[in-house]
Image (tube, rainbow, N blue to C red):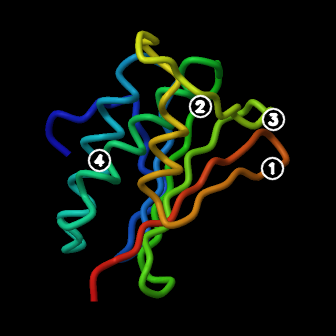
């Protein structure tokens, strides 16, 4: 993919499923946005592209802020009328949702995920955690 960091690794990509791994580096957020946008456009899911890119950007930023290991992003669109997106990192602690004050520069990422998604949650894995969200697909 042109313009996408060489450090991002495509782990899998088939119609309805894509998975990438990013190093915990500042360019990971931009690269994740580009890959998610391009993939959703290829899948014909333009109606959910902007909100998906926004939420992935927030979750990858959270991972980047606290994790030192690789950040994973997975998307599934073949499990019914929803798009499932997962962002994982090697830290076992779930993110903490907090109330951001009007002057705070951060702290709104999980609020955005909660408000914009159909459902969301976290789960622990063998080597870290995954934060996931679902978006309803049109039709």
Q: Residue 40, how many percent across, how many down?
A: 26, 63
Name which of mark 1 and mark 3 comes first in the sequence: 3
Tell me the distance, in whole angstroms, between the alpha carbons under discs 2 and 4.
Answer: 16 Å
Q: Residue at x 28, y 81 (%)?
A: 138
Tell me the distance, in whole angstroms, between the alpha carbons under discs 1 and 4.
Answer: 24 Å
For label 2, count other residues whose C-alpha is less than 10 Å away and answer few (under 14), some (14-19) or many (20+): some
Q: In which image quadrant can residue 132 be found?
A: bottom right
Front of the two marks 4 and 3: 3
Q: Residue 34, how many percent across, how many down?
A: 24, 42
Q: Which residue is mark 3?
A: 92
Which quarter of the figure is the C terminus placed in?
bottom left
Q: In which image quadrant can residue 16 be found?
A: bottom left
Towards the viewer: 103 or 18: 103
For label 4, count other residues whose C-alpha is less than 10 Å away and answer few (under 14), some (14-19) or many (20+): many
Q: Which residue is mark 2?
A: 70
Labels 1 & 2 near each other (Cβ < 8 A): no
Decide if residue 135 is on the left or right side of residue 31: right
Towards the viewer: 14 or 52: 52
Up-down: is 72 above or below 42? above
For label 1, count other residues whose C-alpha is less than 10 Å away and answer few (under 14), some (14-19) or many (20+): few
Q: Residue at x 18, y 66 (%)?
A: 46
Tell me the distance, in whole angstroms, between the alpha carbons under discs 1 and 2.
Answer: 14 Å
Q: Which residue is mark 1?
A: 125
């Amino acid at each position: 993919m042109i313009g996408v960091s060489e450090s991002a690794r495509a782990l899998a990509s088939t119609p309805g499923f894509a998975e990438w791994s990013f190093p915990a580096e500042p360019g990971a957020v931009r690269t994740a946005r580009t890959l998610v946008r391009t993939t959703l456009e290829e899948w014909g899911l333009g109606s959910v592209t902007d909100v998906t890119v926004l939420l992935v950007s927030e979750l990858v930023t959270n991972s980047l802020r606290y994790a030192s290991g690789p950040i994973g992003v997975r998307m599934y669109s073949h499990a019914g009328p929803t798009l499932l997106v997962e962002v994982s990192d090697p830290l076992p602690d779930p993110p903490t949702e907090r109330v951001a004050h009007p002057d705070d520069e951060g702290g709104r990422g999980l609020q955005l995920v909660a408000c914009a998604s159909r459902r969301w949650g976290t789960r622990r894995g063998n080597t870290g955690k995954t934060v996931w969200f679902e978006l309803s697909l049109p039709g």
